[in-house]
Image (cartoon, rainbow, N blue to C red):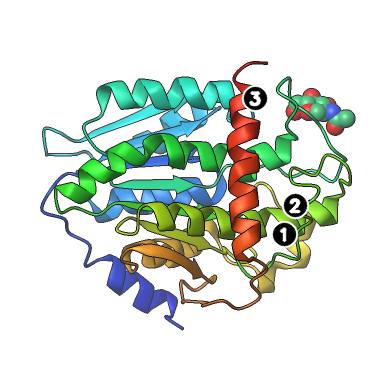
Amino acid sequence: MPSIAAARASNAKYSPSYVPVAIFVGGTSGIGRAIAQAFARYTQGNAHIILCGRNEAAASSIIASFPRPTAPEAKHEFVQCDATLMKNVAATTSALLNRLPKVNFVVLSSGVFSLKGRNETSEGIDRKLALSYYARWKFTSDLMSLLREAKDAGEDAKVMSILGPGNGGNIDLDDLGLKKNYGVLRTALTTPAYNDLMFEAFAERDPSISFVHVYPGAVRTPMLGTLMKIAFYPLTISPEDCAEHMLYALFNVEGGAHRRDNRGDDMGKKRYYGSEEARRRLWDHTVEEITRSATT
Ligand SMILES: *[C@@H]1O[C@H](CO)[C@@H](O)[C@H](O)[C@H]1NC(C)=O
C-alpha cells in the first residue's frame, strides 16, 4: 500500500519525452479537478489538457491554477459538455476527433449525487447511469482511434474511470439499464460492476491500451455534503491526496483491464461480480442504448 509520500514520489518521476494529451471528463470539480491539477503540476504545464464538463467559470479558475507551459504544443482548454445526453457526448468527441492527432489519457469522473429515484433524460436514460456509465463508455469508445494513435507512436494510451471496483454487486442481466427495478442502492451496486465489465470488454478488443477502474475512497468533494464532511472528517481524505493515489494508479498500469483501490493498489478480482455472459450482454445492451439515443 503506497503511502501518500510514496505515491507523490512515484508520480514525480513521470516525465514523458513528448507533450501528452489528457482529457478530463468531469474535470471541473471534485476528484477530476484535483487529478487535472496534479497532472498539470507534474508536467510543469507542458501538456495539452482538456477539461470537459458543464461549468465554464470553474474550468477557467482551474486552468488559471496550472503552471504556465513552455512547450509550444502545450495547451489548456475547456470543452463544454453536459454528458447526461449521449448526443452531447457524440458532438464533443467528433469535434475532438477532427482536431486532435492523438490522446494519451482519458480520465472519467463525471457523476451526480442524488438519493432520488430514476430520472430520465430526453433520451430515456437515467441521469445517474448516464454519467457514471453510458457517457464513460461512449467517450472511451469514440476516442479509441486517438488512443491507438498514441499507442502506435510508442506513447502512453490509458483510460481511467473513477467509481468503485469492489463496491459493486450482482447485476440483473434481465434489467440492464435498470428500467424495471430502479433504486438508489441498486444503482450504487450496479454501476461499479458495469464499469468493471466495460473495461474488460474494451481491453479484449484493444489489449495494448490500459483501462483502469479505480476506487477513490471517501473523499471530501462537493458531492459529499457539508455535514457528512464534518462528521466523517477523520475517515476521509482531501481531493488533493486522493488525486496522488489516482495518478499513481494511472501511471503504474501497462495494457489490459485493471482494478485499483483507493491507494492505487491492484485489487485483482476482489469482490468482482462479472462473468463472460454479463460482459457480452452488457456490451450489446450498451451499443443498443447508445444507437437508440442517437435517434431520439
Ligand atoms: C431530474 O433531473 C433534472 C435535471 O438535473 C432536475 O431538474 C429535476 O429536478 C430532476 N427530477 C427529479 C424528480 O428528481
Where residue 70 sits, quadrant-wise, is top left
The disc, 2 or 3, on the residue closer to the chain's N-terminal end is: 2
- The label on residue 292 is 3
> Would you place residue 137 above or below residue 16 in this image?
above
The disc, 1 or 3, on the residue closer to the chain's N-terminal end is: 1
Distance, label 1 to label 3, CA atoms, is 40 Å
Residue bearing mark 2: 226
Q: Residue at x 34, y 59 (%)?
A: 207
Give amino acid for label 2.
Thr
Packing grade of label 2 (10 A; few <14, some 14-19, many >=20) is: few
9 left or right of 194 in image = left
Packing grade of label 1 (10 A; few <14, some 14-19, many >=20) is: some
Are dots 2 and 3 in contact, CB under 8 Å? no
Q: Residue at x 84, y 56 (%)?
A: 185
Distance, label 2 to label 1, CA atoms, is 5 Å
Local SS, label 2 = helix
- The label on residue 229 is 1
State whether label 3 is within 8 Å of ligand 1.
no
Q: Residue at x 75, y 52 (%)?
A: 226
Which x, y percent locates residue 271?
Answer: 66, 75
Local SS, label 1 = helix
Residue 66: tell me if it is visible: no
